[in-house]
Image (tube, rainbow, N blue to C red):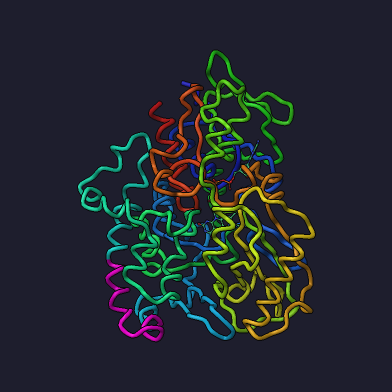
Amino acid sequence: MSKKQTIIIGSGFSALAASSYLAKSGHQVTVLEKNAQIGGRARQLKRDGFTFDIGPTWYWMPDVFERFFADFGKLPSDYYSLEKLSPAYSVYFGQNDRITIGDTLDKICEAFEAEEPGSSVVLRKFIDKAKKNYDIAIKDLVYRPGLSPIELVTPQTAVRVGQFFSTIQKDVRRAFKNERLALILEFPVLFLGAKASKTPGFYSFMNYADFGIGTFHPKKGMYEVVKGMASLAEELGVTIQTGMNVEEILLENGKAIGVMANGQKHLADVILSGADYHHSETLLPERFRQYSESYWEKKTFAPSSLLFYIGFDKKLKNVDHHTLFFDVDFEKHAATIYDDAKWPEEPLFYASFPSITDDNAAPQGQEAGIFLIPIAPGIEDTPEIRAVFLDKILTRFESLTQQNVKNSIIFAESFCVNDFVKDYNSYKGNAYGMANTLLQTAFLRPKLQSKKVKSLFFTGQLSVPGPGVPPSLISGKLVADLINKA
Ligand SMILES: Cc1cc2nc3c(=O)[nH]c(=O)nc-3n(C[C@H](O)[C@H](O)[C@H](O)COP(=O)(O)OP(=O)(O)OC[C@H]3O[C@@H](n4cnc5c(N)ncnc54)[C@H](O)[C@@H]3O)c2cc1C
């Protein structure tokens, strides 16, 4: 019997993961990526001896990556090497005022005690509960395809129903009265794309990922993971083609039969899109789309971001590999993302200096800096606005970390809403897809299989289970299983 021909649109983490699973189960897989470089939001920027990850920088939940590679009899270390970051990160609250999160729960407990005596006892209990949720969620629930609510009903979740209707914010603030500690514990759910006040309490498993497991750095950067996954796919027989823009999904009698890419027809038995879900459906005639424009309009999207990739001509001080700047009002900034979409007056921001840990990131004696401001998707993006915000955050950065950096900039590249749209066909320029709120969890998210077109499937951060690199790997596995069952 001849192999099933399968075309995958896009080469993000979910698409690469799915390509390996499908190739392993006997499909002849071709990945068509519009950009010159694979990896989607996790592409890499190289300039003047500096190397930056354009998207993800936090390697969390190493067990998910291990499980992925183990499905092919491999280890992550067959493709890249990991270093556990110590400290994991630090958080600035004011000038020379920061809390450092160590690489073990014991060290983190010490930091909590120093901030508020007695808080470490509460923290250990909180993380213990978070671990139980992690074991239920990440080892089991997220590996269910989101077909029906029944998937979420297990003996373990039945006793935790309250946690689905409580929020992370309520649970954290019930346990911690100290504002700074509460903000640190609310930080991990930002990866899920919504505020802690809109994220179900059950998602505290992210706190276990943070404090219980830790933060890792793949040597030479996250892009090594992309390269590793692409190598695995190619070993399994997948063909990856870049510079291939898919313009249309071709149909015959309600069945997907191929795609039009760069004006050429490519026929296949199965089409899987790993591009943003909204964009993927625009490749179909309107009556074959499952979700209307008003459906997408009503959804809570994860933020977009204004990013800067800066080469500094010296080493910086008073910063860690990952450094968060929470010195301004969190609620005010969050309101500009979720309630009234506009640019924040005083933004919180995140900065990463991979060259602190990794010699490959910058020439000797210099520093690579990535700065990220989360913003509302779809807001106005101009070179002038970007320049204003670069100046704003660097002014604060200089004062908070007590050093001059503006006159040490060799170059500053930026990436924002317009680039997310142009480079990834991202809906409103979102960075992290659709948020994991209660009403956008599991079976309430856009489905992995089209209900209107036979042989058409979807994967990625807008589908099941949600945003982030580990969920994207899982999404690729889930959709491959569905395709094989169809
Ligand atoms: C700035 C930023 C920081 C992040 N930080 C972290 C982090 O620290 N840790 C973490 O775990 N996650 C992080 N994330 C989230 C994580 O990067 C994403 O969830 C994940 O990479 C999404 O993968 P995906 O498979 O959904 O596809 P994407 O990466 O979105 O890839 C989709 C691909 O489809 C291609 N495509 C689109 N349209 C077409 C077309 N018509 N034809 C052909 N190809 C097409 C695109 O070019 C793209 O390559 C971050 C994301 C961003 C943007």
Taking the spot 65% from the left edge, 55% from the top edge, the residue there is 342
Residue 277 vertical position relative to residue 129 in the rendered view, above or below: above
What is the magenta range? Answer: 111-128
For the C terminus, the quadrant is: top left
Residue 58 in view here: yes
Most extreme residue toward the top, as rendered? 253
Location of residue 230 in the rendering, given as x and y in whole percent from the top left corner: 57, 48
Q: Give the main secondary structure of the magenta stretch.
A: helix
| Residue 125 sits in quarter | bottom left
Horizontal side of residue 118 vs 299, given as left or right? left
Horizontal side of residue 5 vs 25, given as left or right? right
Residue 388 vertical position relative to residue 120 in the rendered view, above or below: above
Query: Is 265 one of the magenta-colored residues?
Result: no
Query: Which of these two is toward me, 428 or 37?
Result: 428
| Residue 225 sits in quarter | bottom right
Query: Which of these two is toward me, 141 or 197?
Result: 197
Total labels: the figure holds: 0
Query: Which of these two is toward me, 33 or 373?
Result: 373
Location of residue 475 in the rendering, given as x and y in whole percent from the top left corner: 45, 43
Taking the spot 41% from the left edge, 84% from the top edge, the residue there is 115
Location of residue 88 in the rendering, given as x and y in whole percent from the top left corner: 48, 73
Residue 39 in view here: no
Location of residue 409 in the rendering, given as x and y in whole percent from the top left corner: 77, 74
Residue 317 vertical position relative to residue 238 in the rendered view, above or below: below
Query: Is 127 one of the magenta-colored residues?
Result: yes
Taking the spot 68% from the left edge, 23% from the top edge, the residue there is 265
Residue 182 vertical position relative to residue 482 in the rendered view, above or below: below
Taking the spot 65% from the left edge, 70% from the top edge, the residue there is 360
